[in-house]
Amino acid sequence: MRFKDNVVARLIFVLSCLIILNILSSYVFFRVDFTADKRYTLDKVTKRILREVKDPIIITMYVSEDLPPDISRTIRDFKHLLTEYNAHSKKRIEIEEVNPNSNEELEMKAIEVGIHPVPLEVREKDQVKVQKVFLGLVIQVGEKSETIPLIQPGIAMEYNLSTLIKRLTIQDKPKVGYVIGHGEPVLATLDQMTKELSVLYDLKTIDLNTRMDLSEYKAIMILSPFEEIKPREFRRLDNYLATGGGIFVGIDRVNGILNHGIGVGVNTNLETWLEEKGILVEDAFIVDKKCSTVTVQEKSYFSYPQQYNFPYLPLITEFSDHSITDGIEAMILQFASPLKYVGDSSLVYHELAWTSDMSGKLKAPVSFNIGQIWGPSDFLYPRQTVAAALHGPIVSEQEARLCVIGDGNFIVNGVGEQKITIQADNINFVANAIDWLSDDSGLMSLRTKGVQSRPLKELTDSKVLFIKYFNFLFPLLLVVILGLLQFRRRSKKRTRLMKNGVVK
């Protein structure tokens, strides 16, 4: 009887604990994340955005049912993400789920808000059929709304979701000025950059020859001018810095003209203005063994494309510990020039990115030879600085900020048939730099959260040869050694048995 009472008491105790834990879990939410890039942990920027939310957020998911297992897993992970968002927003997020496939009215409503069906191959009863599925959502804050037409797997969803919530809840976007009038790329050719900056900033073109109030701009961009900038325009920039402004400069000190096979120097007076501030941009081309490629149409009996490594397109993978380069893993530059600090110690100079240990520099003018065979003697200047940040009393006692990169075309997409997709980290670098110049943490850490590219470590030829033969010979050697040990063990056993007269 006593034993029976103890069992009942223990069952009541365990059930009580489970009920209490269940109640507590509805109020307190936590998750232990062991992934290297913390993909299942909300970034501090996301948490800050959610803390600043004042109005209720309605998220309507337009998701079909009976999805394949891998798509269902993506949707389940996304719902877990929304649960965390809701927990950190103090329950200000209301989540609704709609299955547009249930009736035509809901299907039309999904299409009206910008969510279109996606054809998906599914296997059913040993047959493959194409199913029309919806995988989107709408975020609504007050009268404003944004649409994510396709929920994609991976941690990019956190950036997309936080970006849209930030865009919907931000009241007045700060202005960023883009200098024009000296042959700079027009904004239409900077598609990726303008989309990224438009999340947090209002990007406006400015002409330094007109009388406009620069103090209303949080930061100013100067990108790849090819015509001379006049002294009075520099005075306006100096006045802007004197009031504590921040300027981003992407300078083309040299210009590579591939169609003509030559590279020449560029003088716009911007290089002189930067040198007065303490940053010298050399009129030289950086060449790097770690580089991107160019495609050349080879002609023999047949015409075919052939890719060649082109050291004038350095692949930058060495970055310093700075908020601008936080999470940046790889940038591709084109016809870049090295930077050097020639100022005094009153300013804080921070090198942001370097070339590899196998890099060099060639003073302009140069001639390009796509088929050139490059040797170690061509790469005598390792770790050249290609980007740097400067802050302190640059012009007046007021602290100002300056960010410079020795390439002005590294974020130019172009237009029409010439349009290209720019490396994502090139865009992240500029966006982070504008955040830093504006003294706003923005979405810097969230923008580059997660691994986007992880290039293999460069090995010397001798090391590659050693690893190759080691992988081939070591398993064979191991088998031979184990065979010899087995043979020796059996021989000893046989000798011992023969001594005892067991074996004759």
Image: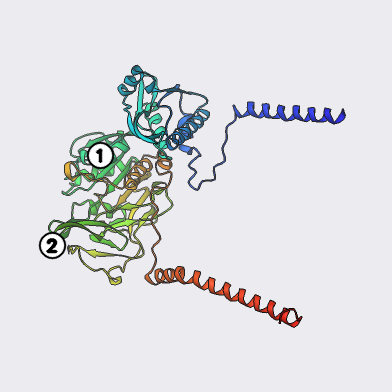
Picture residue at 20% right of the left edge, 34% below the top: 211
Q: Residues within 10 Å of mark 1 (few under 14, many from 20)?
A: some
Let me know if residue 147 appears in the view: yes
| Residue 206 position in % (x across, y down) | 22, 37
Q: List the residue tagged with mark 2.
A: 300
Which one is nearer the viewer's eye here, 208 or 266? Answer: 266
Indicate left or right for 474 with 275 as reference: right
Find residue 145 and report its image quarter.
top left
Q: Quadrant of residue 377?
A: bottom left
- Front residue of 229/221: it is 221
Answer yes or no: do the residues labelled 1 and 2 have beta carbons within 8 Å? no
> Measuring 43% from the left and 71% from the top, which residue is drawn there?
469
In three-dimensional space, the C-alpha distance between marks 1 and 2, rounded to whole angstroms, equals: 38 Å
* Amino acid beneath label 1: Asp
Residue 173 against residue 109 in the figure, above or below: below
In the displayed image of the protein, which residue is found farthest to the right?
Answer: 1
Quadrant in which the N terminus is drawn:
top right
Circle 1 sits in a helix, a strand or a loop, which is it?
A: helix
Near mark 2 (Cα within 10 A), the count class, few <14, some 14-19 or many ≥20, is few
Disc 2 residue type?
A: Ser
Rendering coords of residue 119 (x, y %): 32, 32
The answer to whether residue 265 of the structure is visible from this angle is no
Mark number displayed over residue 191: 1
Task: Label 2, secondary structure: give it.
Answer: loop
Q: Is residue 122 above or below residue 249?
A: above
Percent position (x, y) of residue 117? 32, 28
Vertical relation: 191 (above or below) 109:
below
Q: Residue at x 33, y 19 (%)?
A: 109
The quadrant in which residue 289 appears is bottom left
Pinpoint residue 267: horizontal percent, then vertical percent.
18, 54
Is residue 397 shown left or right of residue 212?
right
